[in-house]
Image (spheres, rainbow, N blue to C red):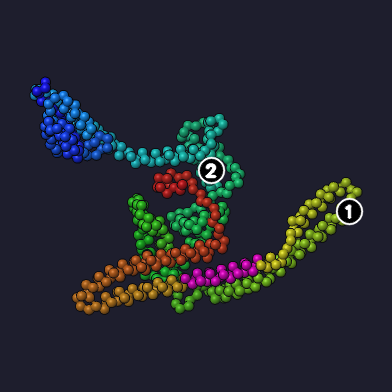
Amino acid sequence: MTGKLGFIAGVINRERMASFERLLWRICRGNVYLKFSEMDAPLEDPVTKEEIQKNIFIIFYQGEQLRQKIKKICDGFRATVYPCPEPAVERREMLESVNVRLEDLITVITQTESHRQRLLQEAAANWHSWLIKVQKMKAVYHILNMCNIDVTQQCVIAEIWFPVADATRIKRALEQGMELSGSSMAPIMTTVQSKTAPPTFNRTNKFTAGFQNIVDAYGVGSYREINPAPYTIITFPFLFAVMFGDCGHGTVMLLAALWMILNERRLLSQKTDNEIWNTFFHGRYLIHFINMFLFNYSDSSNAPLYKHQQEVQSFFVVMALISVPWMLLIKPFILRASHRKSQLQASRIQEDATENIEGDSSSPSSRSGQRTSADTHGALDDHGEEFNFGDVFVHQAIHTIEYCLGCISNTASYLRLWALSLAHAQLSEVLWTMVMNSGLQTRGWGGIVGVFIIFAVFAVLTVAILLIMEGLSAFLHALRLHWVEFQNKFYVGDGYKFSPFSFKHILDGTAEE
């Protein structure tokens, strides 16, 4: 046995081959023979699923001690050692057995892949419907988690907000759900009193939704608070048209919005995450409507908007000027006179009550008279708060200063209408003079070719500067005029929006959290 040569065969990672060979040579003192070759096809790691390059090796040795050393080195380098019989007949039989097993494995893998492919194809046909079902089930269970269970464990109690106008539809939907589910318990819907402020719900359509979003961006109105959106539908396009002030560019923008409106079904089906495109597309009706204001008058220099406009404006200016001394000087004296009058009336009531008590002290109703006197005294205490004329005067002075500053701010803000209108006209003239007009003045064949190039530059600059930048500037200034100068006079906007449960919004991804 000592004179026979033994061998060990296996595979090892290619990057470890040099170190493996060097260590093997040093530990065995050169008493082994190593033969290796590179594998052509990379192998896949069963754990990490990464491709690994490996080498096949065979080591010839003599003696049991060298065999033990070689096995330890192979284990240290994580080499995979495969058993290989010494007789050639057994090696051939093992090779045939391995080939048969490989063919069987290839057959099994092929059939598994084809079966998985069929399953995936069948699942792909139903994937969209499954996704919708899962989203609906998730939404339903999310709502059920917010409900309470009855003591009998047989029904669910839910507290919800709903529009009063939709009460009949909700009852009918509950009855239909009861019939479809086969339940024997009829749904019960009652109105309860709550101290929580109700949410705000404004019905909108495709046209009014854009204007309502402008108002809601400032702040959602409180319950039953006046909604500025109906006024914004008229005033916002009007102010935008005054600042944009260009029929030709307005027509181009109008046609772009009209194209989006006419193709809205096809564009809606092409869902995209591009925020810029979604911003313009969701505001298509707003863009379409803000360019439809057109003015036609003979005297373009100073034409009134309506009859007797000058008289009405003069009246408002006079009233605004009168309000300053009225708030500062007259209103404090009116408040002091009103306070003295209420004190005088209260003192008379107290004297009458005292006389009635003294005259009827022996009557059985004296106790009730005493109670009346006590009530009257409490009322007098309520109305008899201290009135400080100096504090009232200072308070009115502060209000007067705020009023004057507000008038100046409003005037300066509305002057932007005139300034932006002039800026748009000047930019249009500059682009025409500096770009297009220079191309039209070129003579010869070069001028013919140059006109096409210059017109392309002119068209790009017109769309980028006059339509997009100037349109956005006019839009933002109209937005500021509505938010700061219009809505802050009467609109608080400290409520919260009514977000009803809707499968449509959930599937579209527009449902609010």
The quadrant holding residue 431 is bottom left
Q: Quadrant of the N terminus?
A: top left
Q: Which residue is mark 2?
A: 160
Q: Is residue 308 visible?
A: no
Point out the tag, 2 or 1, that comes first from the N-terminus.
2
Relative image position of residue 363 (x, y in whole percent)? 89, 48
Q: Amino acid at mark 1?
A: Glu
Whether tag 2 and tag 1 are in contact, CB under 8 A, the answer is no
Q: CA distance from mark 2 to mark 1?
A: 59 Å
Relative image position of residue 22 (x, y in whole percent)? 16, 37
- Rendered image: mark on residue 358: 1
Instruction: Determine the residue positioned at 20% across, 31% down.
Output: 74
- Rendered image: mark on residue 180: none
Q: Does residue 256 lie above or below 317 as drawn?
A: above
Give the crowd class for mark 2: few <14, some 14-19, many >=20 residues within 10 Å. Answer: few
Instruction: Determine the residue positioned at 66% across, 67% down.
Output: 394
Task: Looking at the picture, tell me which residue is in the foreground, 492 or 288.
Answer: 492
The quadrant holding residue 353 is bottom right
Q: Which residues are magenta?
A: 395-416
Task: Looking at the picture, tell me which residue is in the foreground, 189 or 359.
Answer: 359
Point out the residue furthest to the right here. Answer: 362
